[in-house]
Amino acid sequence: MNTSDIVQKLWNFCNILRDDGVTYMQYVTELTLLLFLKMAQETGVESQLPVGCRWGDLTAEDGVDQLEFYKAMLLQLGRASTKSRVQSIYANAQTSISKPRFLAKLVSNIDELDWYSAKEEGLGDLYEGLLEKNSEEKKSGAGQYFTPRVLIYSMVKLLQPQPGEIIQDPAAGTGGFIVAAHRYIKEQTGDLFDLSTAAQDFQRTKAFHGMELVQDAHRLLLMNLLLHGIESDIGLGDTLSGDGTNLPKADVILTNPPFGTKTGGGRPTRDDFTFPTSNKQLAFLQHIYRGLKLGGRAAVVLPDNVLFEDGQGAKIRADLMDKCNLHTILRLPTGIFYAQGVKTNVLFFQRGQTETGNTAAVWFYDMRTNMPSFGKRTPLTAEHFREFEGCYGADPNGGSDRTDTGEEGRWRCFSREAIAKRGNNLDISWLRDDSLQRAEDLPEPLELAAEIQERLTVANEAIAQLVEILAP
């Protein structure tokens, strides 16, 4: 069996639990808790687990006793006395299974998988496949923690992370950017064997840093890193709080911050941000460009409102273009993220050696206009990024020779002066959208509603900030 076959088989197991009222996200979490035990047995690392809390101990039980044993085992594995990585994966873990026969069936099915093939194919790839499967299910809500891997691979390939660099993802999700950066470095270094022993140890244990806010996503993240041989400590916490100040300055930041405003409408509690805002993406953007070492580089996925929001948004963009060389913006097509109709971009920039005047011009690639709306029927593939990657060039900091393709092309350059005249508005488009020439070709009502909602959210935030400023 290949990886996709095993992933499909694992995913089909969720049908067992639907009758027990288990959601997709709960199922993947449940599967993670069980798979960790089974994979520890298969890979010969059960010494990480306390005696009496191993796969063989669970399979030795049956019926009601097995379910009660499993519940007690989860508590034991989540205790602080357990080895730190195991304890983090099982912290506050509870089973969603209420009927003994469902647990017995799930354990039996996991035991009967073709583990020889799974190990040959790579357990990390298997787990990534499972996470991707979960993200595709709209009802699971897991898409918010999963960035399309073809987009991640393109971003990583263009930034070219190197051995010895500190690499950060401040909104780590299930670890896609970290895994992809680790894989890229392994490909450039003969699976790390070209490096010294000390350098190999650095790559596995110290190169990667980050943070994830949601504990269930953090659990999946830790499992993903473990299966890819990454032992770096990615913390559970809020980057937009004081926790984020503990993240070290990075050579490379790759991330896709969560969309929307901060929960409850409050502002981030970071006291080191120059421009306070309740817009999480603008707050994350400040963290990112302030968190780069001098000369460090970043690629970050952000929604359109970051490009056009007035007030604090315009000030943050101006500050970004002062402190960094914002050299490239990729306008992504619709349909590639979980939120219906959301429009996104990738911003590529390098931290300057000075505090002002680092952006001379910004290059835009329009991958959105007259492109299909991607989804299950029209999947996004690596081929869709080929032209953009060619335009971007071999220099990770945008220094390759570039040629403006004019108003009829997708690749254009706008000077810093031209952008300043627009009030630092980076929401720039120039291609005629052929799909809007006929009434019957207008975007779907849900997509239009999503765009209207986004604009209203931005307007409401601006009003709230104005009220706060004017309040006595």
Image (cartoon, rainbow, N blue to C red):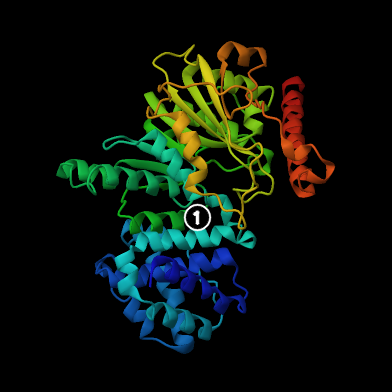
Query: On the image, which quarter does residue 45 sit in?
Result: bottom left
Q: Nearer the viewer, residue 56 or 343?
A: 343
Question: Split into 4 quadrants, where in the image is the C terminus?
Answer: top right
Where is residue 188, by image quadrant?
Answer: top left
Closer to us: 386 or 236? 386
Q: Quadrant of the N terminus?
A: bottom left
Residue 450 placement (x, y as % from top left)? 74, 44
Q: Secondary structure at mark 1?
A: helix
Say which amino acid is labelled 1.
Ala
What residue lies at 58% left-to-right and 23% top-to-bottom? 316
- Specify few, some or many for label 1: CA neighbours under 10 Å numbering under 14, 14-19, or 20 or more: many
Quarter-of-image position of residue 427: top right
Figure label count: 1
Residue at image location 33% in from the left, 48% down from the top: 183
Using residue 93 as the reference point, say whether residue 439 is left or right of it: right
Name of the residue lying farthest toward the right: 439
Q: Nearer the viewer, residue 197 or 326?
A: 326
Q: Is residue 75 above or below residue 103?
A: above
From the top left corner, tell me how far across and down residue 404 is, in percent: 54, 21
- Find residue 117 and report its horizontal and vertical position in percent: 33, 71
Q: Is residue 10 left or right of residue 54?
A: right
Q: Which residue is painted at 67% across and 29% down in the image?
A: 431
Where is mark 1, residue-wise? 217
Query: Would you place residue 137 above or below residue 272 in this image?
Result: below
428 or 322, nearer to the observer: 428
Can the viewer see residue 420 in this picture? yes
Q: Residue furthest bottom?
A: 63
Tell me: 403 left or right of 370: left
Q: Is residue 272 visible?
A: no
